[in-house]
Image (cartoon, helix red, strand yellow):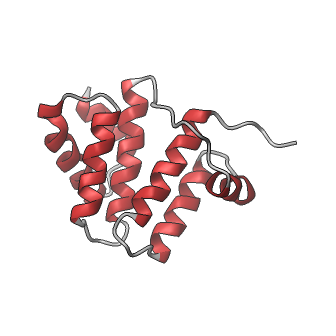
């Protein structure tokens, strides 16, 4: 029997998929990264495929600030996996910062910082510690 996946986590995978598709070039590296994120969270391939092909109707925003940063950092990693940041990807990351209720005046700084961390391949803990 499948372990149920929270709506919050399903929403995260859908956002990652949207990010991968946002630049009109769904790179194989992005697909691999998507499945890697699923594996890291204990979600098998079949379950992820089901999330992507039968999406939830209403996406959920993470409750904690740490979880919001974690998910935004995953999105930054997804952006950088092909070593290119497109305008569409950057705009989508900004949109998610706003969706996650970060102040508008901080959105550019947050996005730039997370993309820079992704470029430097920083671990999530290091990113979280530097923000707190």
Q: Residue furthest left?
A: 105
Which is nearer the eye, 44 or 21? 21
Q: Position of residue 117 (x, y in %)?
A: 26, 51
**Does residue 12 lie above or below 36 as drawn?**
above
Which is nearer the eye, 53 or 43? 53
Q: Position of residue 34 (x, y in %)?
A: 53, 60
Question: In the image, what residue occupies the spot 46% across and 54% down?
Answer: 16
Q: Is residue 1 visible?
A: yes
Q: Is residue 120 visible?
A: no
Q: Residue furthest front?
A: 57
Left or right? Give the position of 20 relative to 23.
right
Left or right? Give the position of 23 relative to 40.
left
Q: Quadrant of the N terminus?
A: top right
Which is nearer the eye, 117 or 16? 16
Which is nearer the eye, 63 or 125? 63
How many numbered marks, from 0 up? Answer: 0
Q: Quadrant of the C terminus?
A: top left
Question: In the image, what residue occupies the spot 50% across and 44% down?
Answer: 12
Question: In the image, what residue occupies the spot 33% across and 53% down?
Answer: 76
Q: Position of residue 124 (x, y in %)?
A: 38, 43
Q: Position of residue 9 (x, y in %)?
A: 57, 39
**Does residue 104 lie above or below 21 as drawn?**
above
Question: In the image, what residue occupies the spot 43% across and 63% down?
Answer: 20
Residue 101 image-quadrant placement: top left
């Amino acid at each position: 029997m499948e372990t149920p996946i929270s709506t919050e986590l399903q929403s995260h995978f859908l956002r990652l998929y949207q990010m991968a598709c946002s630049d009109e070039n769904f790179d194989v590296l992005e697909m691999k990264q998507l499945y890697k994120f699923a594996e890291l969270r204990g979600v098998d391939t079949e379950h992820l495929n089901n999330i992507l092909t039968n999406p939830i109707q209403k996406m959920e925003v993470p409750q904690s600030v740490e979880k919001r940063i974690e998910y935004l950092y995953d999105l930054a990693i997804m952006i950088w996996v092909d070593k290119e940041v497109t305008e569409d990807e950057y705009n989508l990351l900004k949109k998610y910062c706003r969706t996650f209720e970060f102040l508008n005046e901080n959105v550019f700084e947050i996005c730039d910082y997370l993309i820079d961390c992704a470029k430097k391949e920083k671990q999530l803990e290091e990113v979280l510690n530097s923000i707190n």
